[in-house]
Amino acid sequence: MKKDKKKINHSLVGIIMGSKSDWGTMKHCSDTLKNFKIRHDVRVISAHRTPQRLHKYLKEAEKKGIEIIIAGAGGAAHLAGVTASITTLPVLGIPIESKLKGLDSLLSTVQMPSGIPVGTLAIGKAGSINSALLAISMLSTRYPNVLNKLKSFRSKFEKKVPNKPY
Ligand code: RP5
């Protein structure tokens, strides 16, 4: 169902990350959403360090009208998977770079057994930016103003690519 042009006064996206140390990566996600003027909130929530905070946050997120959760975590990165097991909101996962260059984070996030999906993006900054762009794309099917901004972004993006490599 398309949303009308009424101003949206609540966050549409919730960004969560396992540690404050993930912010350097997750900031790119927040900045991308800001560029599209998509309201979002940002929290440090860990699946293993603050499990109660995670449950409380997701309960409130659903009530507050958040539509998509983006979860970044590194190492044994189960935050996105645990989040997806608690909520029916779509969950996008960002593997954070780690001592193993993020390969551990990637496999921990992407290898969900069938039944509880996590839409996993690339390791690090690229994944962080793309998670925001994917969330924007998902929102664009319901919010015509978001669709217009996305189309304009894509058109500018294409123009930035040079025709020749030299
Ligand atoms: C994970 O452990 C976090 O998502 C972070 O990427 C990693 C390291 O956390 P810190 O030790 O830096 O707090 O849970």
Image (cartoon, rainbow, N blue to C red):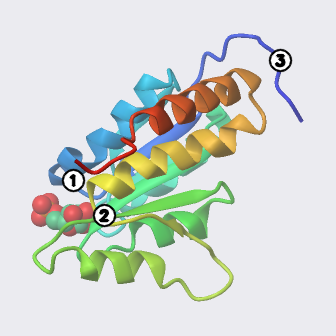
Seen in the picture, residue 28 relative to 69 is either above or below; the reply is above
The mark lying in front, picked from 3 and 1, is 3
In the rendered image, the residue lying farthest to the right is: 1
Crowding around mark 2 (Cα neighbors within 10 Å: few <14, some 14 to 19, many 20+) is many
Residue holding disc 3:
4
Crowding around mark 1 (Cα neighbors within 10 Å: few <14, some 14 to 19, many 20+) is many
Instruction: State how far apart marks 3 and 2 are (Cα).
Output: 35 Å
Choose between 10 and 47: the one closer to the eye: 10
Tell me if label 1 and label 2 are in contact, CB under 8 Å.
yes
Q: Is mark 1 within 8 Å of ligand 1?
A: yes
Q: Residue at x 45, y 65 (%)?
A: 80
Given the image, on which type of amino acid does mark 3 rest?
Asp
- In the image, is 102 to the left or to the right of 80? left
Whether residue 68 is visible: yes
Kindly state the secondary structure of the residue where label 2 is placed: strand
* Residue 57 pos. (x, y %): 49, 46
In the rendered image, the residue lying farthest to the top is: 6
> What mark, if any, has residue 22 been given in the picture?
1
Choose between 145 and 152: the one closer to the eye: 152
* Residue 118 pos. (x, y %): 55, 69
Kindly state the secondary structure of the residue where label 1 is placed: helix
Residue holding disc 2:
73
Instruction: State how far apart marks 3 and 1 are (Cα).
Output: 35 Å
Choose between 95 and 148: the one closer to the eye: 148
Seen in the picture, residue 79 relative to 30 is either above or below; the reply is below
Seen in the picture, residue 164 relative to 77 is either above or below; the reply is above
Sooner in the amino-acid sequence: mark 3 or mark 2: 3
Kindly state the secondary structure of the residue where label 3 is placed: loop
Q: Residue at x 26, y 80 (%)?
A: 103
